[in-house]
Amino acid sequence: MISNCVLNLSGDKPQVLRGAARVLRPDGRLAISDVIAGEDMDEATRADMQKWTGCIAAALTRREFHRALSAAGLLDIEIGETHRVHEHAAAAIVRARKRSASQALSIASEGLASHRVSDGLGVSTVASEPERARLAVSLSTVTREWTRIGMTGFGGPPAHIAMLRRLVVDRYGWMDAREFEDANAACGLLPGPASTQLAIFCAYRVAGPLGAIAGGLGFVVPAVAMVLALSVLFLASAPPKWVTGVGAGAGAAVAPVAVHAAVRLLAPSFERVRAARWRMLRWLVYLCASAVAAATIGGYLVLVLLACGAFELAWQRRTAGAVSLNPVLLASVAGVGGGGALVWTAFKVGALSYGGGFVIVPLMQTGAVHTYHWMTGGQFLNAVALGQVTPGPVLATVAAVGYAAHGIAGGALAAVVAFIPSFSFILLGGRRFERLRQNAPARAFLDGAGPAAIGAILGAVIPLTSALQEGWQYAVLVAALAALLLLRRGVVQTLLGAGTVGLLASLLGAPVPH
């Protein structure tokens, strides 16, 4: 244990930390009591603090402390604040672990380029700034922390983003706030589940490609496993009546959840275009075209989404040759309902969906219910509800559709196909990821595909509502709509409440869908 008194006697805290690491045995643990400066501290306050004496003198920020410990060859760094000591500083306990001898030898042999880093054993290696950050976090830490988020991340993408920020920015300082916000914005420009891609990128940023795989799987697998387990119960050929009742109640609330999701997306999307009349007109056309397509020709919705994005890209570049993607060719793998059809359905929701998690619903519904007849309309509502009430990415819903098509193997296949694009985007483009936010073609495409995705969610309300079979379900629908839009209840809370009503209705002898 090193107290802040020892640290503050030295004018060079990183030097003290390197010295402590040298005398620490391999795989040994270190604890430090010190004061952490706030990231929002301005230069004048920072300069003034250098003149002070006592605990607060020369306080390092989380990021600076993390870098100093990383450079000293320490891993599994945890920085936990205990109480505030100043407007811009807090007392904290810092914990870290020294690399094992085998880890130090492995790192020394890699020959990474740009900055020399002491490994704490007297061995130096060379590492770039991004690589130095990655070396500080072990795969076991990434696996544990990302799995924790995957198992407790109720509430969809907003909750996932908040939990990731608390982990990598506030708690450990692995990324600074600006870097995290840029990564979040860049993920919003990619097709597929943005919060999943952000989770994979954050793991990539702190632990490299293997970290991206470990963290991504930790975030995704729990949700897929839960959805598959619940699918066995709720999508059985002859489930108990109470199970059917729960599913029917929760399913009745799915259409209101779609309305709620669209309403939350509408305002910020419209705000971006309201100042430009022609752009606002195109926004309205994309929204309406996609809404009509989702309500009437859901099987071809992906073509409408891509066409809206392509048209806006061509408009902004003033050339019709801006897009080379041929979605008709992609759709040819669908076949007539076998494995190819499931792969195409999963690929659509994983690689060609824009605008938030709920847009996957209209992309899946027509194929799963009307084209390939893998499930009934009521079962599809159950599948969507399962994806909403379980933690982790909403895209895990595709596992329920895969289960209905081809059992457990089909569910696993659908999940793999749906999530592979997200892993691929990060693993193949991670080094250039931060540039995506400034990529004009990507932003232009999203200017068309984004409002189209919102329209698709709104249009999906019609087939979702038409799938209801019993009168009492419409009463649940109205109540859920009021809970979400008027009382501002959460999605998970509303779905669980609707499921409880369905359970009570079934126990009291009310008819349930077959």
Image (tube, rainbow, N blue to C red):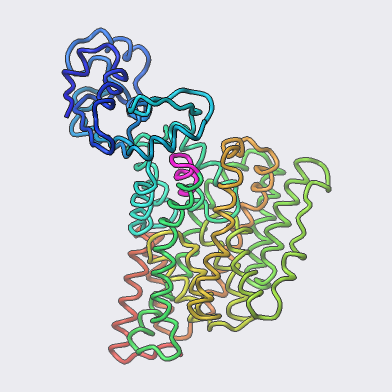
Q: Is residue 122 magenta?
A: no
* Residue shown at the point (32%, 33%) measured from the top left: 74
Q: Is residue 12 above or below residue 282?
A: above
Q: Is residue 364 visible?
A: yes
Q: Can you give x and y, in whole percent of width and height, for residue 346 in the image? A: 59, 67
Q: Position of residue 358 (x, y in %)?
A: 52, 62
Residue drawn at (25%, 33%) of the image: 25
Does residue 355 appear to the left or right of 245 in the view shown?
right
Q: Could you say which quadrant of the image residue 203 lies in?
A: top left
> Left or right: 333 with respect to 166?
right
The rendered magenta stretch, by its main secondary structure, is classed as helix
Give yes or no for residue 203 being in the magenta stretch: yes
Picture quarter with the N terminus: top left
> In the rendered view, would you say 417 is above or below 189?
below
Task: Residue 256 in the image: state x and y as whole percent.
Answer: 45, 67
Residue 446, placed above or below residue 73 = below
Numbered-mark total:
0
Q: Which residues are magenta?
A: 199-208
Q: Which residue is nearer to you in this view: 208 or 316?
A: 208
Query: Would you say residue 39 is visible in this rendering?
Result: no
